[in-house]
Image (cartoon, helix red, strand yellow):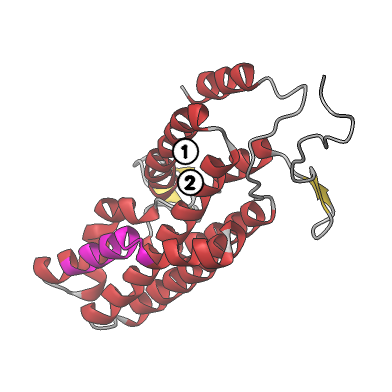
Amino acid sequence: QASSSEEPESHPPLFDPHIGAMWNRWITLTAGIFAMLCAGPIYTFGAIHSSIKTLLSATELQVQLIGVAGDVGLWTKVFPGLAFDLLGARATMLGGAVLSGLGYVLMYFALLEQWPPVLVAGAWFLAGEGSGFILTSALFASTKNFAPKDRGIVTGILACMFGTSATVLGSLLGGCLGGHIDNDGECQEGFLGGSVTNYMVLLAVAIPTITILAALATRVREGHVTGERDHASFRFTILLVSLS
């Protein structure tokens, strides 16, 4: 018979007194899904490549340099990883919002004022680095919240949304948001309508805003303790069906 003095196993509290809210790993996963949608604008460079080349009167090599700079920023994960370990998921995601927002603002002015391609590459690099911060924090916040047996499907769901990001944003760029298509098939009075400068305005506003909201909803809690009504298998099935 167990000793009556034996203390029950303790787990971190579900209520976080510092933020005044219940911890819920599904809220964090949902926030991560939206954050991942904000992490992929770098992959829309192929859709804006020709417009950037025309606006800057740049050579093909110079435009390729700009595109590569964004890729390098996105995949340089050393700094996001350090930030995640030292400051946590929320601070890392907020840092990504700031960096990406700054990058898109600089891209807007760079294209408007026809900056030298090397400076444009620097702005696109900042946007890519911000995306790297967002991706890292969204991915590892949720994988930490789930047990090892669930981490594969969590990673797959978030990776799916990251891959979808460029498709969604590319559709907005090529669409006629807020306008109409005339008889010649041209967009009239639309906000984007293929305009790369307006696209940068959209990114500079929407990406930081959504990312900040996602960061506020992101909480990491070790231990993988679940409530009685967690129903992980059912919820994963609903997510997978929705995404497919």
Q: Which residue is mark 1?
A: 158
Residue depicted at x 66% and y 38%: 25
Q: Is residue 162 above or below residue 55?
A: above
Q: Is residue 179 visible?
A: no
> What kind of element bears circle 1?
helix
Q: Amino acid at mark 2?
A: Leu
Is residue 209 left or right of 75 when viewed as pictured?
right
Residue range highlighted in magenta: 65-78
Quarter of the rendering containing residue 93: bottom right
Is residue 228 left or right of 214 when viewed as pictured?
right
Q: Earlier in the sequence, mark 2 or mark 1?
A: 2
- Residue 170, image x, y percentages: 38, 46
Q: Is residue 72 visible?
A: yes
Q: Nearer the viewer, residue 229 or 59?
A: 229
Is residue 233 left or right of 67 when viewed as pictured?
right
Q: Which residue is mark 2?
A: 139
> What kind of element bears circle 2?
helix
Disc 2 residue crowd, few under 14, some 14–19, many 20+, Cα 10 Å: many
- Residue 150, image x, y percentages: 51, 28
Whether residue 77 appears in magenta in the rendering, the answer is yes
| Tag 2 and tag 1, C-beta contact below 8 Å | yes
Q: Is residue 24 above or below residue 66?
A: above
Q: Main secondary structure of the magenta part?
A: helix
For this orientation, the residue located farthest to the right is 4
Q: Nearer the viewer, residue 119 or 58?
A: 119
Disc 1 residue crowd, few under 14, some 14–19, many 20+, Cα 10 Å: many
